[in-house]
Amino acid sequence: TEYEYTPDKDDIPKEYKLTPRIPSLNHYLYESQYFAQMVHVYDDSKKLLGVTDSYPGEVTIPANSGTLTLRTQIRHEDPAALEKLNQQVVWVERKIGDVSLSVHNSHMSMVANVGTFSKRVLKPDQSTAAFVSAPNLEALGKIKGLQCGDVLEGNISYEAAKSGARGGASKRPGGYPISYVVGPKALEVKKDESK
């Protein structure tokens, strides 16, 4: 099956990276009923730019590559099983830079966007709640090519790094995964000036 990906106009004149993903099949290899899965990435002149497999990696897209073609290649001995994959979803993962989030002590302070999470020390077997707000919609609006349904993924760290701590930096390397699904743009409410 072939898919087209048209990059943002700002990306066309410069090199960038992307990772094609097939969420329902990726990371399944030996336990999958499908024997192989590959995604070939071609530029608009049909030049092969890269190939990913069950464990996708980044593909470098040269400047001025135009509209890309992503061709999936999946192997199975039963053609009927392959036909079921004709409407398979393919995600294109791109880096967009940092998106800031604020963390709050309570749900109400998150909703009202007042105050931030205060530092606290937890003893073993203690826990606390932290409420992470959605990204600033005005800042999201400045990210070119961002559309409703896009998923922003990143990492968050809950620990403060300690200098001279025994056994490492006392921080989980890479942090913890966090994601946000971009919603639709808010409708502008027009004021009734007839009153």
Image (tube, rainbow, N blue to C red):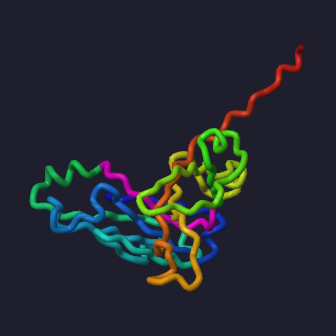
User: Is 164 positioned to the left or the right of 56 in the image?
Assistant: right
Q: Residue furthest left?
A: 77
Is residue 173 placed above or below 93 in the rendered structure? below
Q: Which residue is situated farthest in the front direction here?
A: 123
Magenta span dominant secondary structure: loop
Q: Is residue 96 magenta?
A: yes
Residue 96, x across and y down, in percent: 59, 65
Specify whether residue 90 is painted magenta: yes
How far across and down, in percent of the image, does residue 132 sit?
58, 51
Q: Pinpoint residue 93: horizontal percent, then vertical percent.
A: 47, 64
Q: Residue at x 40, y 70 (%)?
A: 41
Which contiguous range is marked in magenta? 87-99
Q: Nearer the viewer, residue 42 or 121?
A: 121
Relative height, residue 89 to residue 39 (above, below): above
Q: Which residue is more in the foreground, 67 or 10?
A: 10
Image-based side of 27 in relation to 170, left or right: left
116 in relation to 46, above or below: above
Residue 148 vertical placement versus 15 (above, below): above
Q: Position of residue 45 (x, y in %)?
A: 47, 73
Residue positioned 16% across, 52% down in the render: 81
**Left or right side of 29 for 14:** right
- Please give the name of the residue rendered at 46% of the width and 72% of the height, measured from the top-left corner: 172
Residue displayed at 19% across by 54% down: 82
Q: Nearer the viewer, residue 37 or 100?
A: 100
The quarter of the rendered structure image containing the C terminus is: top right
Numbered disc total:
0
Position of the N terminus, as image quadrant, is bottom left
In the image: residue 156, left or right of residue 56? right
Residue 47 occupies quadrant: bottom left
Res. 117 image quadrant: bottom right
